[in-house]
Amino acid sequence: MVDLGIPPGFEPDGAAFAKMVDDTRGKNGGKLQKYTITAKQIILYFDALTPNQTVEFSYPLKAKFPLRAKTFASRVYEYYNPTVEDFVVPAELTVSAKK
């Protein structure tokens, strides 16, 4: 599982995650099975990741208004063994108005 923190004032595009699920149906190993978007996080449910396997993806976030904010921490962990985990520290983001 992957918990991606959504920074305050930003809105994720669920279509990007829906496409990731659709693109990986019927294939084996490390594929996105489903996702959940809450107010503060995006939870990704991957299937059958192997040790040291790398999964790369990107997704858009839309700023609702100009701001300076820090993301919430993001975390990856095993669904049935959440003590096997890793974290990414929050990052600072600045959004300014168009001129």
Image: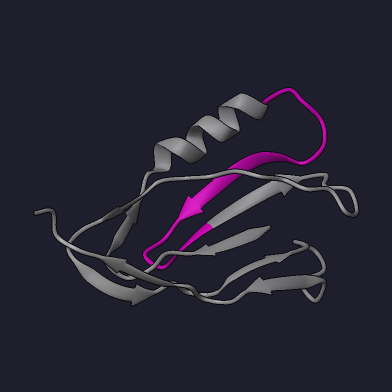
Q: Residue 89 occupies which quadrant of the picture?
A: bottom right
Residue 61: image x %, image y %?
36, 52
Q: Quadrant of the C terminus?
A: bottom left
Query: Which residue is rendered at x = 65% and y = 40% of the image?
Result: 33
Q: Is residue 65 depicted above or below 33 in this figure?
A: below
Residue 38: image x %, image y %?
41, 61
Query: As drawn, which residue projects farthest toward the left?
Result: 99
Query: Which residue is rendered at x = 65% and y = 50% of the image?
Result: 45
Q: Please state which of residues 16 and 34 is positioned toward the viewer in this rendering.
A: 16
Q: Is residue 22 depicted above or below 80 in this figure?
A: above
Q: Quadrant of the N terminus?
A: bottom right
Q: Residue 21: within the magenta? A: no
Q: Residue 35: within the magenta? A: yes
Is residue 94 shown left or right of residue 1?
Answer: left
Q: Please state which of residues 56 and 18 is positioned toward the viewer in this rendering.
A: 56
Q: Please state which of residues 5 and 46 is positioned toward the viewer in this rendering.
A: 5
Q: Is residue 80 depicted above or below 45 in this figure?
A: below
- Magenta residue span: 25-42
Query: As drawn, which residue projects farthest toward the top?
Result: 26
Q: Tell me which colouring the rendered structure shows.
A: one colour
Residue 32: image x %, image y %?
65, 40
Query: Which residue is rendered at x = 80% and y = 64% of the image?
Result: 80
Q: Is residue 70 depicted above or below 49 in this figure?
A: below
Residue 98: image x %, image y %?
13, 53
Q: Residue 67 occupies which quadrant of the picture?
A: bottom left
